């Protein structure tokens, strides 16, 4: 599974959406109606999945943002 | 002062996930207790439980809302939505500030507590899930019911251990009686069949160790030796008679009295003479303005622990006098459901209301050996057809909380 696919799975599960609705360019706050609790939970799940720490959700608004952030952290 | 009637009911129980399935099980003496499947209880010598079966929260409520809830909230919301639908109250057609919620739990989101404390230990303080607090806090069942139904009136949760559900119904009754709301979704919910919940009660030696589901919950039997943990929820729609008549609602029964007292005795043991429970029963009969001989049925707390059942028997005698106590029919439906803790008083209120409505008294099953300390008529093993006018519902909680509600058969005004 790629980083994108894992993140997609987490978002699909948390927000109860279809996979087709969660693409790299999707803005999860605006397009998927994620509220602050959803966002915190998605970040928590990503931290668990990749064993990383996301210090701030600032600047993270699209699925691609999350993928890039995770890839930077896991490459290091 | 408003009269208060029951116009809707909902339940999630070990006997089925609707008020109708629950009652059909009770009136046929069906046992909802089975092998403990949620985890291996061998180490604490616990083998059976009253588990909820085939419950899918996402089928009865918004999927996203369901995902944000601990099972104790899911059960409560499912029961409340059923009661709301059953009452045929349309939230769009009423003033939502006049519909309130009073639904409690003995413990709250114990599954969320257990899993997140384990996660904290394994992964660190900074890995606790953001949904931990909203899933765990005990009031969230009432909060979620308000969100799911649109109810904007008084919104509270009462926490009185195993009396939570019955205290909630009693306090909701008074809320309507004194005019603070026209309708109240009232009841209790619990989901504590997990490792920490069961091992905690096992450590108190409160749980039955029997391996046979048909011999584990044996209220008022001489060989009783502990309760069987159950889970689920019950919610009643209580409504002012004025409102119910105005919208030509179906009326199941009337709630006419409530008594609440404290033992001031011991954290977990009831006072052996049952005096605290007896006072609550007397208060409920006083408010109902009836005499002990008017009571045809008591749905007992009847947990199947040695201490509860003898002390409750003494309480019934103290409250009613020997003559009326020897005449009244008493049963513990926990023989069929196990003990739903904060949900118990609520599903048992449904049992009392249906017993009045249909003239069928649910039995105490698994009753084999008589106990000289429990010598009342416990409707042993077989349901009984009998028309009665008044029923009491007893709930007695750790901490010495005693709650008794009194229901009356609805025969029109």
Image (cartoon, coloured by chain):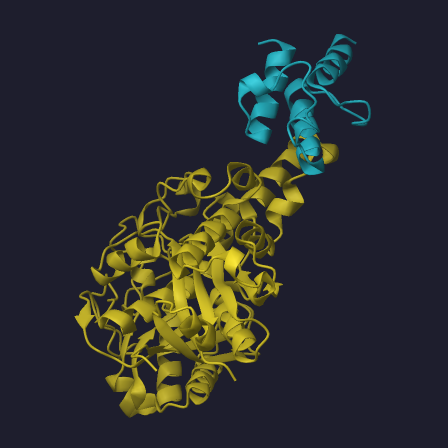
Chain colours: A cyan, B yellow
Does residue A65 sit above or below B218 in this rendering?
Answer: above
- Of residues B401 and B258, the one drawn nearer to the viewer in this rendering: B258
From the top left corner, tell me how far across and down residue B317 is, in percent: 35, 86
From the top left corner, tell me how far across and down residue B145 is, in percent: 54, 53
Q: Give the image quarter of residue B251.
A: bottom left
Q: Is residue B207 visible?
A: no
Q: Which residue is at a point 41% across and 74% down the rendered structure image?
A: B245
Q: Is residue B315 visible?
A: yes
Looking at the image, residue B371 sits to the left or right of residue B122; the answer is left
From the top left corner, tell me how far across and down residue A71 is, in percent: 73, 11
Looking at the image, residue A70 sits to the left or right of residue B106; the answer is right
From the top left corner, tell me how far across and down residue B319 is, in percent: 40, 87
Does residue B404 sit above or below B199 in this rendering?
Answer: below
- Of residues B145 and B124, the one drawn nearer to the viewer in this rendering: B145
Q: Which residue is at a point 73% across and 36% down the rendered structure image?
A: B125
- Of residues A28 and B34, the one drawn nearer to the viewer in this rendering: A28
- Of residues B347 and B222, the one drawn nearer to the viewer in this rendering: B347
Q: Give the image quarter of residue B56.
A: top left
The image quadrant where one finds the C terminus of chain A is top right
The image quadrant where one finds the N terminus of chain A is top right
Q: Which residue is at a point 28% across and 50% down the rendered structure image?
A: B213
């Amino acid at each position: 599974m790629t980083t994108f696919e894992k993140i997609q799975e987490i978002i699909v599960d948390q927000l109860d959406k279809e996979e087709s609705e969660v693409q790299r360019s999707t803005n999860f706050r605006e397009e998927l109606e994620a509220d602050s609790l959803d966002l915190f939970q998605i970040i928590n799940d990503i931290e668990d999945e990749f064993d990383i720490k996301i210090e701030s959700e600032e600047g993270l608004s699209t699925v691609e943002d999350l993928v890039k952030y995770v890839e930077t952290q896991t490459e290091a | 002062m408003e009269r208060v009637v029951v116009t809707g009911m909902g339940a999630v129980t070990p006997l089925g996930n609707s008020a109708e399935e629950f009652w059909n099980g009770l009136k046929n003496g069906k046992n909802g207790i089975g092998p403990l499947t949620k985890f291996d209880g061998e180490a604490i010598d616990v083998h059976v439980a009253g588990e909820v079966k085939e419950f899918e929260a996402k089928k009865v409520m918004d999927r996203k809302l369901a995902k944000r809830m601990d099972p104790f909230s899911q059960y409560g919301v499912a029961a409340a939505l059923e009661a709301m639908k059953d009452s045929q109250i349309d939230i769009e057609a009423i003033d939502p500030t006049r519909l309130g919620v009073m639904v409690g739990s003995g413990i709250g989101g114990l599954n969320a507590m257990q899993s997140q404390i384990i996660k904290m230990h394994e992964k660190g303080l900074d890995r606790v899930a953001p949904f931990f607090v909203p899933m765990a806090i005990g009031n969230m069942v009432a909060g979620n019911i308000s969100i799911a139904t649109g109810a904007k009136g008084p919104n509270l949760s009462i926490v009185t251990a195993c009396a939570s559900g019955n205290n909630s119904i009693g306090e909701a009754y008074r809320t309507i009686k004194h005019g603070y709301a026209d309708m109240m979704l009232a009841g209790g919910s619990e989901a504590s069949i997990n490792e920490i919940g069961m091992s905690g009660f096992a450590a108190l030696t409160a749980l039955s160790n029997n391996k046979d589901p048909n011999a584990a919950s044996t209220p008022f039997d001489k060989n009783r030796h502990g309760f069987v943990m159950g889970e689920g929820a019950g919610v009643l729609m209580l409504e002012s008679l004025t409102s119910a008549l105005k919208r030509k609602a179906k009326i199941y029964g009337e709630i006419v009295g409530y008594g609440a007292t404290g033992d001031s005795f011991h954290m977990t043991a009831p006072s052996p003479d049952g005096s605290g429970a007896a006072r609550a029963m007397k208060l409920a009969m006083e408010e109902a303005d009836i005499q002990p001989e008017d009571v045809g049925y008591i749905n007992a707390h009847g947990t199947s622990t040695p201490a509860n059942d003898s002390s409750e028997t003494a309480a019934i005698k103290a409250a009613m006098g020997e003559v009326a106590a020897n005449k009244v029919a008493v049963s513990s439906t926990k023989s069929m459901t196990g003990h739903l803790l904060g949900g118990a008083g609520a599903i048992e209120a449904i049992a009392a209301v249906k017993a009045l409505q249909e003239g069928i008294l649910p039995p105490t099953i698994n009753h084999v050996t008589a106990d000289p300390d429990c010598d009342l008529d416990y409707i042993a093993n077989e349901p009984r057809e009998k028309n009665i006018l008044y029923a009491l519902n007893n709930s007695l909680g750790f901490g010495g909380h005693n709650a008794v509600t009194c229901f009356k058969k609805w025969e029109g005004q």
